[in-house]
Image (cartoon, rainbow, N blue to C red):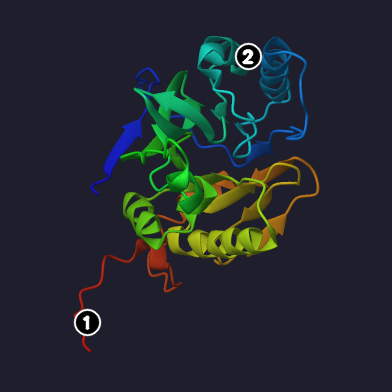
Amino acid sequence: MKIALLFVSLAAAAPAAPKPAEWLVVRAADWDSSWKPKADREWAEKLVAVVSAAAKDGVDALVFAEGFSAGRCPEDLLPSLKGAAGPDMLVALGVMPCKEKGSAVARTWVYSSGGWAAFDKIDPTPAERAAKPPVKPGTRLVLFRWRGGLASVLPSYSAQKPELAAALKKRGVSLLLVPVPAEDDDGWRRVTRAASARAVELGAAVVLVPPSAPPTLYLPAQKGFEPALAAGARDVRVPWRRLLELRSPPAGSTEARPFLDPATYYQVEF
């Protein structure tokens, strides 16, 4: 299957790019996945309120866990959520089941630079493929030009795939946001170990957002970076400027930066 790479940047052209912020705040949306609202209107009002509160707190990126919508597809709420977020915040609405031309898809909406982009899970899980109707795979890996760098949002199952990591490395992604579903302990161990590897391979910050636990931040294993930071609250602080500076090593530097190395040439022998 061929995967198209899509860059999304809807911001108006500016005469000069602003200096990247030293730190960015990424928030895992505080959402009780077991909550059962009395009506869809109550659910919609809470969703808008969570986005609005994050904007008022000055959060840079707000991420919802995979499956937070409990089967709801909030497409009709996108204009209200845009107004609540304002022009500068990035919002990732987890991963949720939706219908597309008679097929089921696992869809993510991301608000960035004042506009929404929708894309579908590239590789549905075995359970999603076995569903009736089966979840149709998406064909686009979406990157966002954001705050002077590149960001991407991947479901946790996709974040465990080395071939997708290779595509992100080639483009120089500096922030990877990963909505995580409510999985068992083995599933959590898989995604955390993969996230640590992605941070090293990409030279990027990787933020895991589970449904009912604090977010977890993984950083590159480079000089001046902690290898992994676990937050006790809903927010994590990402050293954004230093992440972007990793792609411009000082002259004469011999520090190993594998994410900058070109593709190797080799042959496989048996």
Which residue extends farthest bottom?
Answer: 270
Sequence-wise first label, 1 or 2: 2
Residue 224 vertical placement versus 167 (above, below) = below
Q: Nearer the viewer, residue 103 or 89?
A: 103
Q: Residue at x 40, y 21 (%)?
A: 11
Classify 10 Å Cα crowding around label 2: few (below 14), some (14-19), many (20 and above). many
Q: Is residue 111 visible?
A: yes
Asked whether, in this view, residue 264 is left or right of residue 197, the answer is left
Q: Which mark is residue 124?
A: none
**Element assignment for label 2:** helix
Q: Nearer the viewer, residue 5 or 72?
A: 72
Which of the 4 image quarters holds residue 223? bottom right
Label total for image: 2
Residue type, mark 1 in image: Val
Asked whether, in this view, residue 179 is left or right of residue 147, the answer is right
Q: Which residue is mark 1?
A: 268
Q: Is residue 225 visible?
A: no
Q: Residue at x 77, y 34 (%)?
A: 34
Q: Which residue is mark 2?
A: 84
Q: Residue at x 38, y 21 (%)?
A: 10
The quadrant the C terminus occupies is: bottom left
Tag nearer the camera, 1 or 2: 1
Which of the 4 image quarters holds residue 39? top right
Asked whether, in this view, residue 175 is left or right of residue 187, the answer is left
Q: Residue at x 62, y 59 (%)?
A: 187
